[in-house]
Amino acid sequence: MNRFGRRSLILATSAFATLSAPAIHAQSRGTLRVGLGPQQPTQADTRRVWEPLYRLVAERLGLSLTLNVANDWAGISVALQNEQIDIAQMGPWGYILAHVNGGSRIVNTMLVNGIPTYKAIIVGRPGLSIARFPEEARGLSMQMLDRGSTSGWLVPTHFLRSKGIDPQSFFGRYAEGASAAAAQMATINGQVDLATGWDTHRNTMIRNGTINATSNQIIWESEPLPNECVVVRRGMEDGMARRIGELFAGLTQAELESLPWPYTGFVPATHEPYKGLEQMGRDLGVLRAA
């Protein structure tokens, strides 16, 4: 097992310690086991805004609900691969890892302001002047998120590598593993020059009043990426997986209005839009060549 694999397993064990028992079919014990990625600024925020929706879905399936929020994006992916949970709301790279390594299946893509995409971003501390990125960023400090994050690790790392840049030697001080909120705050407080993240999360922090639009600055952004998704474990019966996908895609307008801003719905999904991210993982050597 490579260094990434060992680290992810440790993170998953920590994040889902309460789910360490052998996987049991949700239908046979009357419980839907849900795992959420650390989408909101805190784990408590993530639980607060998403638990009502998943309780509604569980009720319509005739099941009770067990919901856990992961500490990081890598942890939830490995938990799903190991079938410690039945369903996960997760980032696209986490889905790729769970799909390739554990056969997990996507059922829905989430919509943000009506569209199924978002962007990875790199933000800079106030007053930082960079006319050309990444060329003028040599020697600056960089904080990335954990290696299970799409926008916080995979996409910016692939971009830099495509420019012939090894992030760990290019930047003067390089670190991984911060939460998205902590990375944003580190640039605002001047603890680091640069940090990775994603536009939806930063915009949510601005809307919530946690930061201002001018607290830091966007230095770089990616092309549109396929959005977060709802994914089920490998061993779930096909009928149950279809039913879950239909429930999310069929939410009424009134029910959708309860979703946290800026999420506006769910659409049926296939693996196709996520193939580009899978290829990035293979390019970086995290996934074996097909």
Image: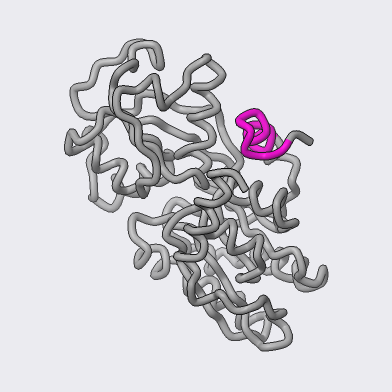
Residue at (69%, 80%) from the top-left corner? 24
Residue at (61%, 70%) from the top-left corner? 85
Residue at (53%, 36%) from the top-left corner? 154
Q: Where is residue 160 in the image (x, y as percent from the top left)?
A: 49, 22
258 above or below 156? below
- Tell me if I can see residue 258 in this picture: no
182 above or below 27? above
46 above or below 289? below
Residue 74 located within the stretch drawn in magenta: no
Q: In this view, does 220 lie to the left or right of 30?
A: left
44 vs 12, nearest the viewer: 12
- Tell me if I can see residue 18 in this picture: yes
Check the picture and name the quadrant holding the C terminus.
top right
Residue 282 located within the stretch drawn in magenta: yes
Q: Position of residue 137 (x, y in %)?
A: 33, 17
Residue 283 image-quadrant placement:
top right
Q: Which colour scheme is used?
A: one colour
53 vs 218, nearest the viewer: 218
Q: Where is residue 232 in the image (x, y as percent from the top left)?
A: 68, 64
186 above or below 22? above
The residue sitting at the right extreme is 238
Residue at (65%, 65%) from the top-left corner? 82
Helix, strand or loop: magenta stretch: helix
Which span of residues is magenta-colored? 276-288
Q: Is residue 108 left or right of residue 17?
A: right
The residue sitting at the front extreme is 1
Q: How many labels does the image show?
A: 0
